[in-house]
Image (cartoon, rainbow, N blue to C red):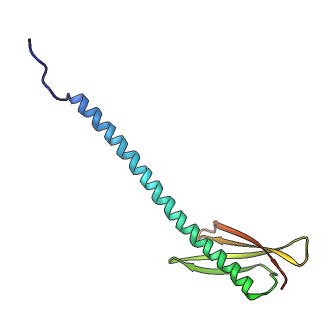
Amino acid sequence: MTRPRPGFTLVEVLVALAIVAISLGAGLKAAGALTSNTQRLVEVTAAQWCADNALTNLRLARQFPGADTEFECHQLGRDFRGQLRSTRTDNASFRRVDAVVLDGNEHVLVTISTVMGRY
């Protein structure tokens, strides 16, 4: 009677290697998605700062918003272009102002809205 040798067969080793390869591939894909999401979050956060700054400048100017205007902003080493869009409300003493920040491809990154009154 011959005893089987201890150890793994070639098929068992190949199956284990296939499982490890699939797991590593999934891990790399997840890491790539996290990196992409982080870059997007940085860009949107910087755009939000630009919109907040534009609305704050408008408030500090103490001028009732009238026509739409454009602004430029530099945050975190990036240049952003934006628009302040003013629309009338039911009350003539108030205006809705939207600060819209665009990326280089003219896609909207963030829109922040506020209501401003006459001073």
At a point 50% along the width and 64% down the height, the residue shown is 39
Quadrant of res 50: bottom right
| Farthest residue, direction front | 119
Q: Is residue 100 left or right of residue 49?
A: right
At a point 56% along the width and 80% down the height, the residue shown is 74
Quadrant of res 83: bottom right
| Farthest residue, direction left | 1
Q: Is residue 1 above or below residue 77?
A: above
In terms of depth relative to the viewer, which is nearer, 19 or 52?
52
In terms of depth relative to the viewer, which is nearer, 89 or 105?
89
Quarter holding the N terminus is top left
Q: Is residue 102 left or right of residue 1?
A: right
At a point 47% along the width and 54% down the height, the residue shown is 33
Instruction: Return the x and y of residue 84 as percentages of the image width and height.
Output: 73, 76
Instruction: Return the x and y of residue 24 as percentages of the image width and height.
Output: 35, 46
All told, the count of numbered labels is: 0
Quarter holding the C terminus is bottom right
Q: Is residue 1 left or right of residue 101?
A: left
Quadrant of res 10: top left
Instruction: Return the x and y of residue 12 as percentages of the image width and height.
Output: 25, 29
Instruction: Return the x and y of residue 77 as percentages of the image width and height.
Output: 50, 78
At a point 16% along the width and 29% down the height, the residue shown is 7
